[in-house]
Image (tube, rainbow, N blue to C red):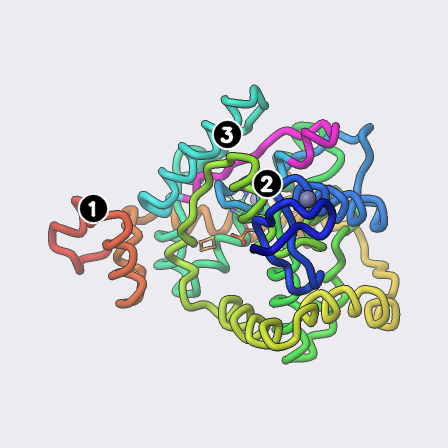
Amino acid sequence: MSKCRSCRAPAVIDLPRHNANFCAEHLEQLCRRQFRRAVDDFEMFTTEDRILVAVSGGKDSLALWDLLVTEGYDAVGLYIGLGIGRYSDESHVIVDAFARDRDLELITVDLRADHGFDVPTAARVTDRVPCSSCGLSKRHIFDTAAREGGFDVVVTGHNLDDEAAVLFGNALRWDVEYLRRQAPVLPARHGFPRKAKPLVRLTEREMAAWCVIRGIDYVVEECPMAIGNRHHMYKEALAVVEATSPGSTAAFYLGFLERMAPLIAHDEDTDAPAPCRMCGSPSGAADAVCAFCRLADRAGAVQPVPVELVLGRGARRRYVEQWGASALMEGDGHGGS
Ligand code: AMP
Ligand code: FES
Ligand code: ZN
Ligand code: ZN
């Protein structure tokens, strides 16, 4: 049996990128060390800051919330109900239970109840991939909740594998504007809060192991609307490289931050955007309506579209296998709105 590098006790995980195996206790120490290193090296926040942590119910964001509070930070959770059928219902239950069990404060925003639409309906009316209206809505709600609640920083559970996959996609297109913004911390600007990603030195597998060791119940399934998107393809491509050459993912992403990002950085000296006429958040031209309010206006004007009806064939089959067919599916099945 393999042994822990630090204490020689039986190991629970092998981490080829560290060329070592670890027991539960020493894996936990490693994760805490990598978390603290990211927070401190990139000057993300301090124990003086009020932190808003965006939690989806997945392993990364729940592990992050756990890390934050056990490392002595003041972190309130924010869960957004995106209206993605039973996947969203289940995520909400998990996040609620996590907060309740640990006596943590959780803010919940529901797209349908609070803004009159949901992600499947937005995907249908915009006729774009669901992740685009989903991402727009999440960013808007993160920013608004941070501003209204007086938080100093919004943190998300993006891990090393996520960030490397985004970097890979941006580099494939040499999208310099996106590459410039791919920092693990973005300062507050023009009414937008500071944003940070404290898990950028930790992998998906390490975060899954963290949740097992710490007894954290999380939603294992991925968002059904994101199945088959490009991000997944880039992750799979990097996983192939990582399997043959352990440490490549970290070298790619952390090397970019250290050696490439400074070469393309420049001061953005743009004017402060005018507030949105409808919601008051920083938007763009004077008297304009922000993209989120325009989306809410369009998607709120039609009948809700159930998630199954906007999934491709393969994703729909997986969704029904996982969550069962809803009453709406069993009805006419193809109607839409
Ligand atoms: P994703 O874009 O789904 O990979 O999620 C990236 C990060 O965004 C997660 O780790 C969370 O911090 C945050 N996030 C995603 N979905 C939600 C949600 N429904 N509510 C709050 N935060 C979320
Ligand atoms: Fe973006 Fe599901 S989380 S569409
Ligand atoms: Zn050990
Ligand atoms: Zn607005």
Q: Amino acid at mark 3?
A: Phe
The answer to which of marks 1 and 3 sits earlier in the sequence is: 3
* For residue 326, above or below residue 168: above
Tell me, yes or no, whether the highlighted magenta stretch contains residue 80.
yes
Q: Which mark is residue 63?
A: 2
Task: Give, as a single range, the part of the protein colored magenta.
Answer: 67-82
The residue that appears at 36% across and 38% down in the rendered structure is: 89
- Residue at the disc numbered 3: 98
Q: Residue 93, position in %: x, y?
A: 40, 32
Quote the CA–CA distance across marks 1 and 3.
27 Å
Q: Observer-nearest residue: 94 or 54?
A: 94
Q: What crowding class fits label 2: few (fewer than 14 Cα within 10 Å), some (14-19), or many (20 or more)?
A: many
Query: Picture quarter containing residue 117?
Result: top left
* For residue 159, above or below residue 264: above
Q: Amino acid at mark 1?
A: Ser
Q: Is residue 71 visible?
A: yes
